[in-house]
Amino acid sequence: MHLHTLPTTTYKRLQTREVKIGNLLLGNGHPIRVQTMTTTDTMDTIATVEQSIRCIEAGAELVRITAPSKNEAENLQNIKNELRKRGYDTPLVADIHFTPNAAEIAARIVEKVRVNPGNYVDKKKFEQIEYTDAEYAEEIDRIRERFTPLVKICKEHGTAMRIGTNHGSLSDRIMSRYGDTAIGMVESAMEFLRIARSEDYHNIVLSMKSSNPIVMVEAYRLLVAHMLEEFGECYPLHLGVTEAGDGEDGRIKSAIGIGTLLQEGIGDTIRVSLTEDPEFEIPVCNDLVRLNQTAPPNLPGGKEQYNAILNAGNSSPRGRLGGASLPVVIADFMLSKEITHQDLQSIGYSYNEATDKWNIADAAADFIYSGNKLIDFGLPGTLKVIIDAASLPAVNTDDKYHPLFQGEEFITLKQSHHPVINFVAVNVEEDYTNILNTVKDNSTVVFCPYGKTLASYRNFAAQTNKPLIIAVESDDYNTVDEQLIHFSQKAGALFLDNIGNGIWLMNCPDKLTVTQISGRTYLPVKNNHQFLNNTSFSILQATRKRISKTEYISCPSCGRTLFDLQETTAKIRAVTHHLKGLKIAIMGCIVNGPGEMADADFGYVGSGPGKITLYKGKEVVKKNIASDVAVDELINLLKENEVWIDSSV
């Protein structure tokens, strides 16, 4: 019997136009290209060349360099000459924001220029201005007049262009009509694309970046839909989550945004924006590309595909599961020979023998899966046990234990049914029609779907209104980095579309090897419960489904950066990590400042050498603070706004 399918749950690689960037071909079925951006001062030719070489040797197929003014744009020639002299012909990309003149210089030198529609011509002063249709049209004419010369230069010199919209830097004009929305991002890029097409210039790549993976994914889907509807074709897409941050969080957030789209066949080049040296971004890019090389069989492209949102989150509640309840986290202890109260420290529970009390962390799991093992000590009331159904007593009404049935075991082991919650594991790659039909009217069932492809999970979710625990196995990947990406893109893609009432990550730790992330060494351990628990909560946080910690929106640094981003991010994280739910942006300069931190509650932005400006939302509250006291001033600002909590409380 064939499984039921929906158009939104099967895929193929999105067909895009072919773009030529120097000697590199992009789009039109060519391999997904990986790239990064230098962090050196563009006027320091040798430093920029040497960092570019490190990136190229790490695997970068394009290298982007900031050109904030005419001087930097002109120096791109020296950088290019030195790279070519040393035998490197990797295409270079000039990053332009506020200076059309610099773009026009760079377009005659390098193979590609990136412009941001939000600040290339338009104003961005965070003013809400009402435009009449006539005034709006006049602004479009002004953009056409200022942008067309660059288009003509690119066309003449064979230079490619990226029209790169960022969520946080939408112009006042776009904001006034569309608001701070994904559709505003799309229209901002489409305005520039229409002008380029009117000049018969098509060597174009587009991007829709945001620090929020939800907004980012929605914007790319909408952009594809709008290009197909208006032009009948798509231009290549550059994927990225901007200001993702560092360490595990940066990788998880990037994998959720980029990986979701790659699994849907969307994306022709990717950049992972980490607050680390740029060469460390490349292995993460390569992992993302490699894990999505076997993707997705078959889907006719169309607007409805990219607008569709499956919503299995609207399930009927079962205890703490389903309905409006926060997604739960299941800790997998299947491979443990025994379970002691000391083991629970790794999943957020610390037992104090002197007081006979449990201390419960914000990121504490809600269930543990024990396999076939009973627990011989008292548990805190917030923690329950999932156990194999065959290991339970014939009659089980104990709220401490809930049975797990393997598919149709639920039909044959009726004596093990629990009166409130029964977990049923389903392989979504197989025919599950019988179990779906059997439990259709059973209000105690919670499904735990597991499988290989995103399409299979979505097919299953579309056919039931039961609560779903998204179970992801990862026994095919050898490093912590690979597992982070695999877990994040598989589970994250589903939570982005409101599919899932809980998360259950499991792996085979025997296969893990030593991994270094952001300078920290991760050793494989027999029971790596803390890694899985932290990853689960980080995925839920990145998809905004369950907030358990402070969120940092940290830019990846570039030649514009005015302080040491890695060191400063670490300092701010050290003193604010306990402020659950707060979003703090740490930006190297004004370009990545108030715009790119659109999602943040507070911002720490470089405003000059050794100077910092502090923001509340998009409002400047303290200007030009000396950097040696700026972290203390940030804490004072948090206290003034009554969001500070002493870490000892």
Image: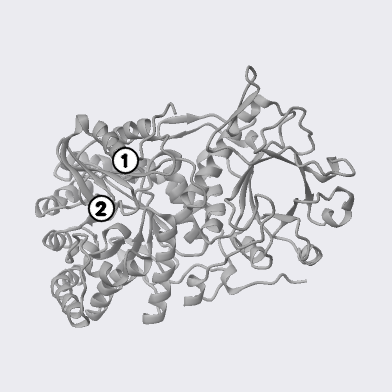
User: In front here: 173 or 11?
Assistant: 173
Q: Which residue is the site of mark 2?
A: 618
Camera sees residue 246: yes
Answer left or right for 68 relative to 55: left
Separation of disc 2 and disc 1 at Cα?
Answer: 36 Å
Label 1 neighbour load within 10 Å: few <14, some 14-19, many 20+: some
Camera sees residue 10: no
Answer left or right for 486 relative to 95: right
**First in residue order: circle 2 vs circle 1:** 1
Instruction: Give the residue displayed 47% in from the left and 61% down from the top.
Output: 261
- Amino acid at the residue labelled 1: Arg
- Residue 383: image location, x then y, percent: 66, 38
Instruction: Give the residue displayed 30% in from the left and 57% down from the top.
Output: 168
Answer left or right for 378 relative to 53: right
User: In front here: 425 or 112?
Assistant: 425
Between marks 2 and 1 in the image, the one whose residue lies nearer the viewer? 2
Instruction: Give the residue displayed 59% in from the left and 35% down from the top.
Output: 512
Quarter of the image that includes the C terminus: top left
Q: Quadrant of residue 509?
A: top right
Answer left or right for 281 relative to 177: right
- Residue 38: image location, x then y, percent: 26, 45
User: In front here: 460 or 42?
Assistant: 460
Q: Which mark is residue 54?
A: 1
- Residue 473: image location, x then y, percent: 64, 47
Secondary element at image label 1: helix
Q: Look at the picture and state if 256 lies above or below 513.
A: below
- Amino acid at the residue labelled 2: Lys
- Residue 594: image location, x then y, percent: 25, 52
Q: Quadrant of residue 205?
A: bottom left
Q: Residue furthest top?
A: 354
Q: Quadrant of residue 366?
A: top right
Secondary element at image label 2: loop
